[in-house]
Image: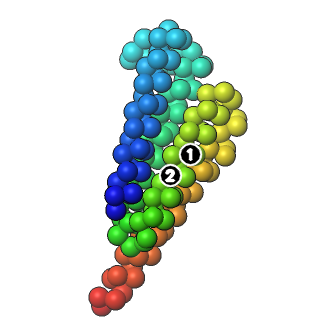
Amino acid sequence: MALVHLVIVLALLEFFAFGMAVGKARGTYGVAAPATSGNELFERYYRVQMNTLELLIMLIPAMWLAARYMDPRIVAALGALYLIGRLVYFVSYVKEPKTRGLGFALSSVPILVLMLGALFGAARAVWHHL
């Protein structure tokens, strides 16, 4: 389980770093808080952070639940793939949003696998207790 915990903390740190990048982009592109628009390049940073938040709220519970029913090393590896995917997403989205597909796939498919693993594992556990 420690590997799973490590990957979860890394995902939180990655999100924190994306937030710091948004803060820096505010200064660089002159977008004062609380505005979230006004410069396209700033908006790209901001969207990466918000898109990451949207996935992060699925990733963490999916990892916790999947680790109950799956090999934690596999769960951690799927989480690591998510981390790589988010980094690819960040770089590609900031550079050219149309190229974000690979990063999105690398970060969303692991979440789907984790959710399905947790669902299958929980259903199997319920079935065995009937």
Q: Residue at x 30, y 91 (%)?
A: 130
Q: CA distance from mark 1 to mark 2?
A: 6 Å
Instruction: Say what secondary structure mark 1 lies in.
Output: helix
Q: Residues within 10 Å of mark 2 (few under 14, many from 20)?
A: many
Q: Is residue 57 visible?
A: no
Q: Please state if 117 lies on the left or on the right of 107 as rendered.
A: left
Residue 71 can be seen in this image:
yes
Judging by the rendered image, the residue that carries numbered circle 2 is 80
The disc label shown at residue 57, or none = none
Residue at 52% of width from left, 31% of height from top? Answer: 47
Picture coordinates of residue 97, whole percent (x, y): 66, 32
Disc 1 residue type? Ile
Q: Are marks 1 and 2 in contact (CB under 8 Å)?
A: yes
Question: Furthest-top residue in view?
Answer: 30
What secondary structure is found at the residue carrying circle 2? Answer: helix
- Tell me the tag on residue 84: 1
Looking at this view, name the residue that lies furthest to the left: 129
